[in-house]
Amino acid sequence: MSKKKLRQRSCIACRKLENWTDLIRTVLVNNEVKVDLNHRMPGRGAWLHRNCFQVALERKAFNRSFKIEGDIKFNEIEDYLKNLSDY
Ligand SMILES: [Zn+2]
């Protein structure tokens, strides 16, 4: 019998491997980082711990992960994280 394994992803900021259920999936749409709550959005995903967002910004991890240079908008993910921490 095979055990069901959780797939692991590494956080784009701290690079730790983690079960994907413990990370946030984000995708880039029109240069804006979108939070993909249902893991259904197409495109290349970047995964991170919610607490690693600041680190990701400092390290430009999103640029690296999405392979783009230049400005990325973070409004949506910032709102999302802010709402989480308000509770
Ligand atoms: Zn992390």
Image: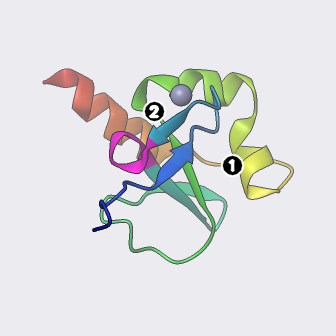
Q: Residue furthest right?
A: 69
Indicate the secondary structure of the residue bearing disc 2.
Answer: loop
Tell me: is circle 1 under 8 Å from ligand 1: no
Q: Position of residue 44 (x, y in %)?
A: 63, 67
Q: Nearer the viewer, residue 26 or 8?
A: 8
Residue in the image at 46% along x and 53% along y = 25
In the figure, residue 37 lies in which quadrant?
A: bottom left
Q: Is 32 drawn above or below residue 71 in the view shown?
A: below
* Quarter of the image with the N terminus in it: bottom left
Magenta highlight range: 19-24
Residue in the image at 33% along x and 48% along y = 21
Specify whether residue 71 is in view: no
Q: Nearer the viewer, mark 1 or mark 2?
A: 2
> Residue 23: which numbered mark, if any?
none
In the figure, residue 35 lies in which quadrant?
A: bottom left
Q: Is 84 drawn above or below residue 44 in the view shown?
A: above
Q: Position of residue 5 (x, y in %)?
A: 36, 56
Q: Nearer the viewer, residue 73 or 2?
A: 2
Q: CA distance from mark 1 to mark 2?
A: 19 Å
Q: Is 32 drawn above or below residue 83 in the view shown?
A: below
Q: Position of residue 78 (x, y in %)?
A: 43, 36
Nearest to N terminus: mark 1 or mark 2: 2
